[in-house]
Image: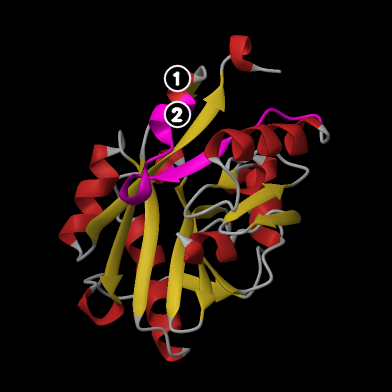
Amino acid sequence: MRLADRSMPGMERVNFRDWILRSALGCTGRANSTLANGDPGLGIEEAIRAVESWYRERGRGAIFQIFESADDLGPVLSAQGYAASEPTVVMCAPLESVRTGEAKRAVVHCDIPPGLHSLVGEPDRVTEITTTTLDKLVAVVSGDDGCALGCGMAVIDGTAAGIFAMRTATDAQGQGVGTIVLAALVTTAHEQGVRDLWLQVEHSNIRAREWYERIGFLEVDAYRYWHPSVSSLR
């Protein structure tokens, strides 16, 4: 969970002992939520009020990111009118055990190249990706006409790398583009000393989860975002 936080931190961050409050200009959950893991240094009720006040000052409702492996806060938030999102699954694998095949046709960049934003989509997501302070790799597979068919990114943190923004153009799906993209990221990350990989995928995306399992990833945790309902906003 700390790896994910460091990979895509919010532009503004405040620590409540173990909790991390994050805010950014965009609307992505990771950069605009509180990573509520561990001891906030206050009583739970007081900590929730403090978090709500902090986000209210920034014109936002409080959002809590809570991992299932450390979810003692969920019932408290539920009782106060918060609702949980669909879970996102965290998967990990030793790099050498990931079976991706050859990285043919993929070009790896150190930043998002021009013209790729339309494939990644979600302008806030692009902003979040490009503002990370860690080293990143962007793999792109292009068609004969030069248009991007697929892309993906790895953010390197020491000997670990997180895989993000795996995208395939609609008319290129089912052609193995994602496999080529991931192979390029894995190969280049290995050359830079990475030994472990992790990624996040929506629980409902069964096809993607099964694919990641087939190539060597295992589910190790999951998290949800807890959002305030209209009645719970103060």
* Amino acid type at mark 2: Val
Q: Is residue 140 visible?
A: no
* 108 sits to left or right of 207: right
Horizontal side of residue 101 vs 90, given as left or right: left
Task: Check the image and name the residue furthest to the left.
Answer: 214
Q: Classify 10 Å Cα crowding around label 2: few (below 14), some (14-19), many (20 and above).
A: few
Magenta span of residues = 59-77
Secondary structure state at the residue bearing disc 1: helix
Q: Percent x, y for residue 190?
A: 39, 85
Image point (45%, 29%), residue name: 76
**Residue with the mark numbered 1:** 79
Q: Quadrant of residue 123?
A: top right
Secondary-structure class at tag 2:
helix
Q: Which mark is drawn over residue 76?
A: 2
Query: In the rendered structure, are the residues bearing label 1 and label 2 in contact, judged by CB atoms less than 8 Å apart?
Result: yes
Task: Specify whether residue 70 is painted magenta.
Answer: yes
